[in-house]
Image (cartoon, rainbow, N blue to C red):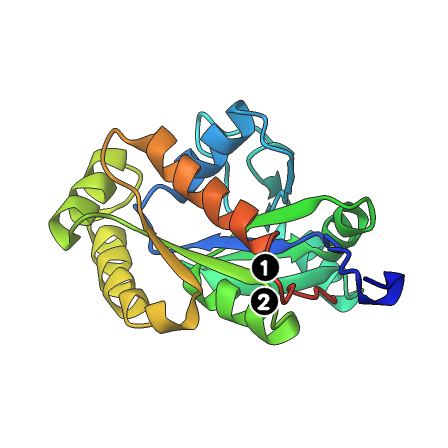
Amino acid sequence: MCDSDFYIHQDEPLVIVISGPSGVGKDAVIDRMKERQLPFHFVVTAATRKPRPDEVNGVDYIFISHDEFAEMIEKGELLEHAIVYNDYKGIPRSQVRQALESGKDVVMRLDVQGAETIRKLCPDALLIFLTAQSEHELVQRLQLRKTETPEGLKLRIATAKKEFNRIEAFDYVVTNKENQLDETVDVINAIINAEHHRVKMRKVTL
C-alpha cells in the first residue's frame, strides 16, 4: 500500500450542546461530568438572573447586570444569547474559541432555543437532547426544586411541552432516569467518543 493511500484519522475538537426542558437535570449532568473530571471545557454561561443559594459566580454562571450583558452584546462578545424566563443568558465567544484552539471539546448547557441557534452558527455541532422518563416525572422534578412561583412553574411546564416538539432538531436523545445520573453521563460520554471516531468528522467553525 502506498503512503498516499494510507488513511490517517484526524481528530478534531467538538462543540457539544446538552439541552432539554427545565427539570430534566441538565445542571446535575454537567456537575457530575465535572466531578468525574471528563476532559472537556465546560462553558460558563453569562446570566442576568440572581444566583440561587447554592450557586457560585464564575463556576455555575457568570452573574452580571443587564447593563453589562447589553455591553457584551454590543461588543459581539456573545456567541449566542436569548431571553430565558424573563432573564438573559449568553455564551461568551472567547471561552469557546480558546478551548477549541487548545484542542479541547467544548460542552455547552443550553435551552432548546439556544441549541438551535448554535446549530445555525455551527452546523456540525453535536446536539444532545436530555429528557425525563415521563411528563409526570418532569413536573415532579420542577415542583421539588421549589425555585418557582406557581405562575413560573406553569410557564416552565408549558414551555417544556413545546420544546419536546423540537426533538428532531437534535442528533441524539438521552433519558436522564431518576437516581441514574452516572448512567446518563456514561451514555453521553459514549456518544462523544463515538463521534470522535466517525469516518466523516464534524468540522467545527465558529
Q: Secondary structure at mark 1?
A: loop
Query: Residue, x 27% and y 35% (percent of image)?
Result: 145
SS at badge 2: helix
Location of the C terminus (image quadrant): bottom right
Instruction: Where is residue 142? Give x, y as percent.
Output: 24, 43
Give how far across and how far down residue 20 sits, in percent: 37, 56
Furthest residue in direction right, as rendered:
3
- Give the camera-side residue of 28 and 148: 28
Comes first in the chain, label 1 or label 2: 2
51 or 81: which is nearer to us? 81
Specify few, some or many for label 1: CA neighbours under 10 Å numbering under 14, 14-19, or 20 or more: few
Q: Amino acid at mark 2?
A: Ile
Which kind of residue does numbered mark 1 sit on?
Answer: Arg
Look at the image and tell me whether residue 105 can be seen: yes
Residue linked to disc 1:
198
Residue toward you, 53 or 99? 99
Q: Which mark is residue 118?
A: 2
- In the picture, the quarter occupied by the N terminus is bottom right
Residue at figure coordinates x 52%, y 24% from the top left: 36
